[in-house]
Image (cartoon, rainbow, N blue to C red):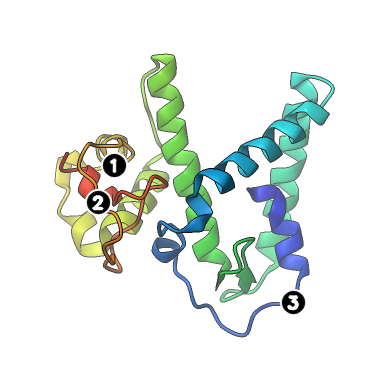
Amino acid sequence: MIAWLPGMLAAPAPTCAEVSAAEYCRPDDRFAPGTNAARIALAQDHAAEQLSGAALADDFNATWQEVDRLCRAEPEGRVVRTRHGDPMLLSEFLLTRVVEVAVHGLDLADVLGCQPWLTAEAADLVQGLLLGPVGAATLGSWAGVSFAFCARRRGASRSRGRKHRTSAAWASDGSRWDENVAN
């Protein structure tokens, strides 16, 4: 949630980053049913506090503008502590936010029957995170929204509990995103 970034940036910076964007997405308690339920309840409570849909949109607009301003003021290499306690580079944490928006945006397009789309920059970031630079370079014409759409799919084959490579990322249900592409 980007709304937590002002607090993350106001807190003392950890001395070093210990978690990458790919490692942040690992299947552990952060995606357990109870944690997901708490996350959903928090979002519902926040939305219910708004007086209207317009107020919710205004709140989001103010939040992203504040977060953008604060992040731009931070030095390269800034380390933050996530709500899960992970010390990671701000740039790596922001990468996880881009992936979330991209993946869930595709989910929404799918559910609403809309044509899925991503910016080229978002597609490149998703591919780079999930496949690493070498893997992303091999996609060729299949790159972009086609890859991201398949990567966010929750296939029947799961690889739970297996240690991931640096270039592999985990989907929130515990499956490896890079293996979902093959399903």
| Residue behind mark 1 | 151
* Front in this rendered view, residue 166 or 29: 29
Q: Is residue 5 above or below residue 20?
A: above
Asked whether the residues under the numbered discs 1 and 2 touch, taking CB atoms below 8 Å apart as contact, a structural biologist would say yes
**Residue 70 sits in which quadrant?**
bottom right
| Residue behind mark 2 | 178
Q: Residue at x 77, y 30 (%)?
A: 58
Q: Position of residue 10 (x, y in %)?
A: 78, 67
> Which quadrant does the C terminus fall into?
top left
* Front in this rendered view, residue 146 or 108: 108
Number of other residues with Cα within 10 Å of mark 3, as a class: few under 14, some 14 to 19, many 20 or more: few
N-term-proximal mark, 3 vs 2: 3
Q: Position of residue 57 (x, y in %)?
A: 72, 28
- Farthest residue, direction front: 34
Q: In the displayed structure, does residue 138 sit left or right of residue 152? A: left
- Badge 3 marks a residue whose secondary structure is loop
**Residues at marks 3 and 2, CA–CA distance in whole angstroms:** 35 Å
- Badge 1 marks a residue whose secondary structure is helix
Q: In the displayed structure, does residue 54 sit left or right of residue 72? A: right
Q: Is residue 74 above or below residue 159?
A: below
The amino acid on which the numbered mark 2 sits, given as a three-letter code, is Asp
- Marking on residue 12: 3
Q: Position of residue 105 (x, y in %)?
A: 46, 32
Q: In the displayed structure, does residue 123 sit left or right of residue 98? A: left
N-term-proximal mark, 1 vs 3: 3
The amino acid on which the numbered mark 1 sits, given as a three-letter code, is Ala
